[in-house]
Amino acid sequence: MSAAKTLLFVTSNANKLAEVKAILATTGITVESKSIELIEIQGTIEEISKDKARRAADNVGGPVLVEDTALCFNALKGLPGPYVKHFLKELKNDGLVKMLAAYDDKRAQAVCTFAYCEGPGQEPILFEGRTDGKIVRQRGEPTFGWDPIFEIGGSTYAEMDSYQKNKISHRFKALQKLKAWLEEKHGGGVAPPPAAPQRIDRRNLGGHEVAQGGNFFDSFGEEVKPRAINIAGDGMGIRKETGRGWQFDNPN
Ligand SMILES: O=c1nc[nH]c2c1ncn2[C@H]1C[C@H](O)[C@@H](COP(=O)(O)OP(=O)(O)OP(=O)(O)O)O1
Ligand SMILES: [Mg+2]
């Protein structure tokens, strides 16, 4: 069976989903989603992504796409890497910055690894994207994970609008490879992107879309309840219920 033009992206992260949808919006590939918090093993980035894909395929009983993101500090030989989620949860961005205080080398790599698995028992295929940057003190809106501390070309990811980030990001680069592979599989059947890419504000995650899959979690381990709400009458947003009350953002 050939790869489908509709992908079922299994993730618990609403921000990832929003970026994947934005990046693939003009390609003719439809992204459906299911929110499952998959067990993540210890190992290399590749081993973790493949295992995640197998678990997701077993869970849904069909073709799935998953993704694992790592943030690799040069001075720390690639750590925290795929374990960055736990570091971020406990130490926050400020603590991640402090981890490099003893080192002059602030270089880091953002690594995105998509794993596509055709179904239970099938070998997952990997598509990896890497973006070089450096770790700086927080700048920009803390909308998505470690975006405020990852700087490239003078701006942190968090200081860029979604269009800028999605042009250079680790996720974009990985999806380019996935797209090329799908095009090959379909013999050119996937539509090429139109000239002008769609501009999507990644702070407005589209409550309707992300709400379909179930529950999402942020990097701090708190459940995010996507709701369709209208902020100032000009967009959709996410309403986040935390122990501290309601917030209108989703920082994971
Ligand atoms: O572009 C990004 N910019 C900033 N932060 C990011 C990005 N992409 C992932 N992140 C954060 C989310 C999580 O704290 C960790 C990856 O962990 P990771 O296991 O891949 O994500 P997750 O558990 O939130 O979702 P999933 O259900 O797809 O595994 O880095
Ligand atoms: Mg995860």
Image (cartoon, grey):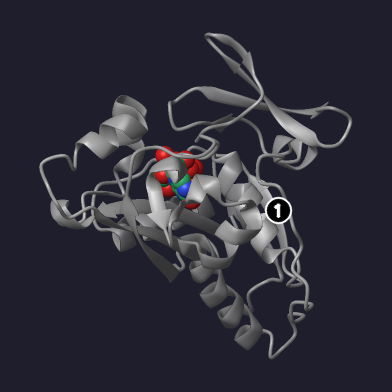
Q: Is residue 120 visible?
A: no
In the picture as drawn, the residue positioned furthest to the bottom comes out as 187
Q: Tell me the residue at 63%/44% (across/down).
A: 34
Q: Tell me the residue at 52%/32% (across/down).
A: 251
Q: Is residue 6 above or below residue 35?
A: below
Q: Is residue 252 above or below residue 45?
A: above
In the picture as drawn, the residue positioned furthest to the left comes out as 102
Q: Is residue 173 visible?
A: yes
Q: Seen in the image, is 112 located left or right of residue 119?
A: left
> Is disc 1 placed on a helix, strand or loop?
strand
Between 173 and 128, the one lying in front of the other is 173
Corner quadrant of residue 211: top right
| Residue 33, percent from left and from top | 66, 48
Corner quadrant of residue 8: bottom right
Q: Tell me the residue at 59%/26% (across/down).
A: 224
Q: Seen in the image, is 70 located left or right of residue 169?
A: left
Q: Is residue 250 above or below residue 113?
A: above
| Residue 189, percent from left and from top | 75, 85
Q: Quadrant of the N terminus?
A: bottom right
| Residue 26, percent from left and from top | 76, 69
Q: Is residue 6 above or below residue 162?
A: below
Q: Residues within 10 Å of mark 1 (few under 14, many from 20)?
A: some
In the picture as drawn, the residue positioned furthest to the right comes out as 233
- Quick check: is the Cβ at mark 1 less than 8 Å away from ligand 1? no
Between 103 and 212, the one lying in front of the other is 103
Between 80 and 37, the one lying in front of the other is 80
For mark 1, what is the residue?
32
| Residue 213, percent from left and from top | 68, 39
Q: Tell me the residue at 40%/65% (across/down).
A: 131
In the picture as drawn, the residue positioned furthest to the top comes out as 244
Residue type at the position of mark 1? Glu
Q: Quadrant of ligand 1?
A: top left
